[in-house]
Image (spheres, rainbow, N blue to C red):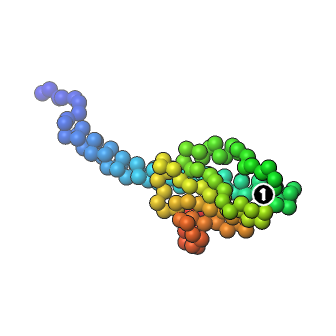
Amino acid sequence: MNKQLGVTLIELMVAVAIVGILAAVAVPSYQAHIVRSNRTAASACLAEYAQFMERNYTSNMSYNPAGFTMPTLQCRNDVARRYTLGIANLAARTYRLTATPTSLQNDPDCGVLTLDQAGAKGANGGFAAADIQKCW
């Protein structure tokens, strides 16, 4: 009586099916995690720029003194592939920082993140509490 050793085709197909099911569950979860972690990095960068703006206001009594330029902070380089950072409504007493997602950051849940001089956070072009809780 000869005993055969090895893996049958059925056993191999079952193993491939199990790996396929695990991949189908794991890949979307991983992609969602990447989107959330990049969003967190962008919101932290907005907070860092807001701190710069407040230091600038403390020194000059204006958010927009003569010769003012936004510095290139390290966080801007870190999120540059996924978000475009900008400043709007820059005046003596107001500003609004924005983080606009690029095509690599497919984030339909939150869209553009904003932060202004009063510390008001926004997402999806508004200031809805549900969006802020989810996105910030």
Nearer the observer, 17 or 93: 93
Q: Is residue 12 above or below residue 37?
A: above
Residue 44 left/right relative to 81: right
Residue 127 left/right relative to 55: left
Of the 4 image quadrants, the one containing the N terminus is top left
Quarter-of-image position of residue 78: top right
Q: Amino acid at mark 1?
A: Asn
Question: x and y percent of residue 69 in the render?
Answer: 74, 49
Question: x and y percent of residue 57 in the render?
Answer: 82, 59
Question: x and y percent of residue 62 in the render?
Answer: 82, 61
Which residue is found at the position 48% from the left and 47% from the top?
104
* Residue at the farthest top position: 2
Question: x and y percent of residue 102 in the render?
Answer: 51, 50
Of the 4 image quadrants, the one containing the C terminus is bottom right
Residue count near mark 1 (Cα–Cα under 10 Å), binned few <14, some 14–19, many ≥20: some
Name the element at disc 1: loop
Nearer the observer, 24 or 60: 60
Q: Is residue 127 above or below residue 21?
A: below
Q: Note whether residue 129 is visible.
A: yes
Q: Note whether residue 43 is visible.
A: no
Which residue is found at the position 56% from the left and 55% from the top?
100
Residue for badge 1: 64
Residue 93 left/right relative to 98: right
